[in-house]
Amino acid sequence: MAYVITEPCINCKYTHCVSVCPVDAFREGPNFLAIDPYECIDCDACVPECPVEAIYPDDEIPLEWEHYIELNDRLSEQWADRHINITADEMPEAEAWAEKEDKTSLLQEEWSA
């Protein structure tokens, strides 16, 4: 079992979770974080650090977010060179985005040049 980041992270990208990860399993995208399922050791350290409750064990993800399992796998590979392990500033207006729903279409997979 690995942990998975889900929709609440989009346009927030709080990074409190990354600094407690003992194996550097987090990858950074333009407006979202992903957890590499092959690096994650299921320690649970990241879960209580997420202020928007975006992180779940892969067997406890709400049904509407199950596609985030594959998404984290794919994006962690795509962003393999974008390890993040130090807390950084959240995205501008993260607080306003924290409670919004249906944000999947806003996820940015590519960094702009």
Image (tube, helix red, strand yellow):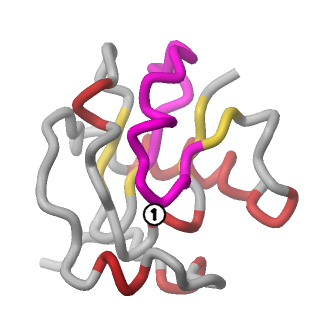
Figure check: 37 above or below 11: above
Instruction: Report the side of 103 relative to 112 (left or right).
Output: right
Instruction: Report the side of 63 relative to 24 (left or right).
Output: right
Q: Position of residue 41 (x, y in %)?
A: 51, 13
Figure check: 31 above or below 103: above
Q: Position of residue 7 (x, y in %)?
A: 58, 66
Q: What residue is rendered at 39% in x and 39% in y?
A: 49
26 falls in the magenta region: no
Figure check: 37 above or below 70: above
Q: What residue is rendered at 67% in x and 49% in y?
A: 70
Q: Position of residue 50 (x, y in %)?
A: 42, 47
Q: Position of residue 4 (x, y in %)?
A: 59, 42
The segment highlighted magenta reads 34-55
The image quarter containing residue 30 is: bottom left
- Number of labels in the image equals 1
Instruction: Report the side of 61 relative to 102 (left or right).
Output: right
Label 1's element? helix
Judging by the rendered image, the residue that carries numbered circle 1 is 9
Q: What residue is rendered at 59% in x and 77% in y?
A: 104
| Most common SS among magenta residues | loop
Q: What residue is rendered at 29% in x and 36% in y?
A: 18
Name the kind of residue labelled 1 in the image: Cys
The image quarter containing residue 27 is: top left
52 falls in the magenta region: yes
Quarter of the figure that contains the N terminus: top right
